[in-house]
Every structure is written in structure tokens, then in C-alpha cells.
Image: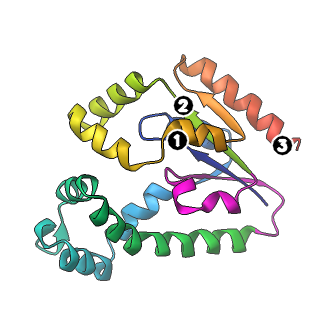
């Protein structure tokens, strides 16, 4: 098993790269999807409502309110991360264990790869990159947020400049989709031949 990470700051195009890799027939584990599944776990929801009472809505939570709280206060973000990261790491290790004897390429799409220290489990790291202004516009349009909200989210992540320094491969996603797809396919061929 060879685990390849796809990462990059919010709005830089890591999900687009992951989708293109998936379309080529590879398994791509989506950590954001794992987090979304957590919000269907009743025990986890109860813990969130207890820790962040302002986000409680019936049996669930208001994720937008939670996002505003944690991205506005690093201490609150650390509390939420202490609740989510151990679950994610356990799940990731289970996947590695289950596939350890398979001689294939596997990919993991994870925004906080370096922040969580998961790069130590990966053979290669791909970082999606794009000009800062394009990144900001993408997030504001996609997530329907103001520039100030984008800044809050972006400022709690490791800078993309630092991620690029730690990467094995950097892919600039500011190009036509067909050109980007060709670049991804070429990279996959190179990875297969390692």
C-alpha cells in the first residue's frame, strides 16, 4: 500500500484534484466526509451541545454557528479539534491496517494533513495551490461567506506557502479543467511507476 495525501488550504482546489483522481479509478478517502458522519453520531452531538451550548438546535447542532465560534477563537477551535481528531486518526489507522497488504495507490483528501501530523503516514504529499485572491473568491462564492469570514477560516490553517515547502508535488489549480486533468493523469502515471 502506498498512501498519497492531497492537501491544500481552503479554496485551493484539493477536492477538485481528488475528484479527478477518483474518476481515474483510484480510492480517495475523504476526511471531510468522515467529519460529516460524526455529526450523525448522537454521543458526539451531545458532547458538542454540552461544550458549545449556543449551537444546540433540538437534537442537532447549528454548524454555521459552531464554525463562527471556533474560527473566531483559537482556544475554542482547539477544544473542537480535541473532540474530532482522535476519532479521525483511529479511522485513518484502521484504513491503513485493512489495506496494508494491498499493493495499490490509495489517496487521502485532508485539509489539515500537516496540522494533524498525518504526513508521517503518507508516502507522498500533493499540495493544491492557487493565487490568494482566486482562493478567496472561490471560498466566498462556494460557501456564501464574506471576506472577513474567509480570513478567519484561512488564518487558522497552516499557510499554503508552508504547505508547499513540505510537499512532494505542488499543483497550481488555476487552469482550465482539461489541462488540470491532464496534469493529474501524468502525475498518476509517475506515481504508479515509483
* Residue 125 vertical placement versus 34 (above, below): above
Report the residue marked by disc 3. 192
Is there CB contact under 8 Å for labels 2 and 1? yes
Residue 111 is one of the magenta-drawn residues: yes
Q: Secondary structure at mark 2?
A: strand
Q: Secondary structure at mark 3?
A: helix
Label 2 and label 3: CA atoms lie apart by 23 Å
Front residue of 29/140: it is 140
> Does the image show residue 30?
no
Report the residue marked by disc 1. 8
Q: Which residues are magenta?
A: 100-123
Where residue 134 appears, as percent x and y from the top left, is 40, 23
Quarter-of-image position of residue 99 = bottom right
Mark 2 or mark 3: whose residue is earlier in sequence: 2
Looking at the rendered image, the disc whose residue lies closer to the viewer, 1 or 3, is 1
Mark 2 or mark 1: whose residue is earlier in sequence: 1
* Residue 165 vertical placement versus 73 (above, below): above
Amino acid at each position: 500500500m502506498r498512501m498519497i495525501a492531497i492537501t491544500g488550504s481552503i479554496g485551493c482546489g484539493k477536492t477538485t484534484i481528488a475528484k479527478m483522481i477518483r474518476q481515474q479509478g483510484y480510492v480517495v478517502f475523504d476526511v471531510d466526509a468522515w467529519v460529516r458522519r460524526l455529526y450523525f453520531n448522537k454521543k458526539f452531538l451531545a458532547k458538542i451541545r454540552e461544550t458549545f451550548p449556543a449551537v444546540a438546535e433540538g437534537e442537532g447542532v447549528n454548524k454555521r454557528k459552531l464554525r463562527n465560534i471556533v474560527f473566531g477563537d483559537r482556544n475554542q477551535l482547539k477544544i473542537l479539534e480535541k473532540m474530532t481528531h482522535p476519532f479521525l486518526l483511529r479511522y485513518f489507522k484502521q484504513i491503513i491496517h485493512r489495506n496494508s497488504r494491498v499493493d495499490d495507490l490509495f489517496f487521502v483528501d485532508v485539509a489539515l494533513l500537516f496540522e494533524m501530523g498525518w504526513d508521517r503516514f503518507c508516502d507522498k504529499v500533493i499540495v493544491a495551490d492557487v493565487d490568494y485572491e482566486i482562493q478567496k473568491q472561490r471560498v466566498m462564492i462556494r460557501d456564501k461567506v464574506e471576506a472577513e469570514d474567509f480570513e478567519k477560516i484561512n488564518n487558522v490553517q497552516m499557510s499554503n506557502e508552508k504547505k508547499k515547502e513540505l510537499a512532494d508535488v505542488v499543483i497550481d489549480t488555476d487552469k482550465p479543467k482539461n489541462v488540470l486533468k491532464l496534469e493529474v493523469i501524468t502525475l498518476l502515471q509517475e506515481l504508479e511507476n515509483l
